[in-house]
Image (cartoon, grey):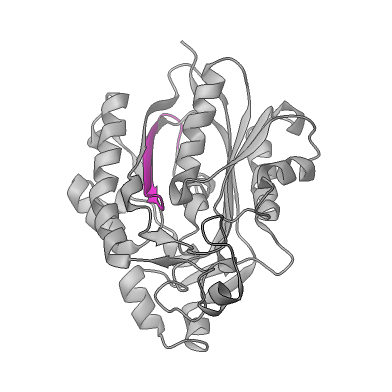
Amino acid sequence: MQSIGIKGMGYYVPENVFTNFDFEKIIDTSDEWIRTRTGIIERRFASKDQATSDLATEASLKAIKNAKISKEDVDMIILATTTADYIAQGAACIVQNKLGLKKIPCFDLNAACTGFIYGLEVAYSLVKSGLYKNILVIGAETLSRIVDMQNRNTCVLFGDGAAAAIIGEVEKGYGFLGFSIGAEGEDNMILKVPAGGSKKPNNEETIKNRENFVIMKGQDVFKFAVSTLPKVTSDALEKAKLKVNDLSMVFPHQANLRIIESAAKRMKFPLEKFYMNLSRYGNTSSASVGIALGEAIEKGLVKKGDNIALTGFGGGLTYGSTIIKWAY
């Protein structure tokens, strides 16, 4: 049976660092308040001339290089994002153009912070079907464009960044071992941008009321996350026919330190085996899990044969996890 996995990873974060002390200058907050409640110290914000597709392209070029393939070997692009460059145009098509590729199918996928994991399962299924050989999966966000810099409860949480993976055939016995994804649509209003879509187009009133920015019910998100992360990871492990102690490392969605700590306790898995970089990047939504994995690979923390879990949750509400036996 064909083994399918990640052939190469890449990630990119903008150069502009925005610290908690920078927030102290513009809103009623403090480094201590942010740090103790979230674990975040700083995050990256895209420059004015950078769009989501620009970040995605940078990460993609690194993934292609690390996969040791040529750009022309890529036969599909899937871009997970909530912050596409334009409303009526897929950012994946813009990335295709920036990479200098022609005609290959490209589409955006919106599963909020779980988008990268959703994209991995879609790519896995398509490669398994035999229709495609090397699918580029990207998670990229410029969340700084949709956060309300007057709302201290949300603006301090988010950052910009991108991660990319090449999905294709890997050495037999390695690669994806199990997936679990799902959604609870009845809770779709817990985390949202109220205006700007077909339900409530932007107008003078929505702009005045600041409805074109992210709002969320923090406690509801927290409760959902700490209960869902262990369950979805356990389900993916069951499909992979593994136990939690078979894992070398877990790469959780980098939303909040307290969420990850609570999930670790419920999973009865050591916190030190949860890779975290949210202190430096904040919550980058669909990019967060991929950025964490890409960074860990660079540091030599992920080795061939390691069993790892990628697990996340997001608006929708969505959730997902995949278990991978690392192939290189």
Residue 320 is inside the magenta segment: yes
The residue located at (44%, 46%) in the rendering is 114
Q: Is residue 187 visible?
A: yes
Instruction: Give the x, y percent position of residue 191.
Output: 40, 60
Instruction: Give the x, y percent position of residue 87.
Output: 65, 53
Nearest the camera: 224 or 71? 224
Instruction: Give the x, y percent position of residue 264.
Output: 24, 51
Using the image, determine if residue 327 lies above or below residue 16. above
Relative horizontal placement of residue 98, taking residue 208 as reference (left or right): right
Dominant SS type (magenta): strand
The quadrant in which residue 45 appears is bottom right
The residue located at (51%, 37%) in the rendering is 119
Nearest the camera: 231 or 241? 231
The region drawn magenta spans 303-323
The residue located at (32%, 52%) in the rendering is 187
Using the image, determine if residue 296 lies above or below residue 121. below
Q: Is residue 300 visible?
A: no
The residue located at (43%, 71%) in the rendering is 154
Using the image, determine if residue 317 lies above or below residue 121. below
Residue 154 is inside the magenta segment: no
Identify the residue at the far top of this view. Answer: 1
Instruction: Give the x, y percent position of residue 203.
Output: 61, 71
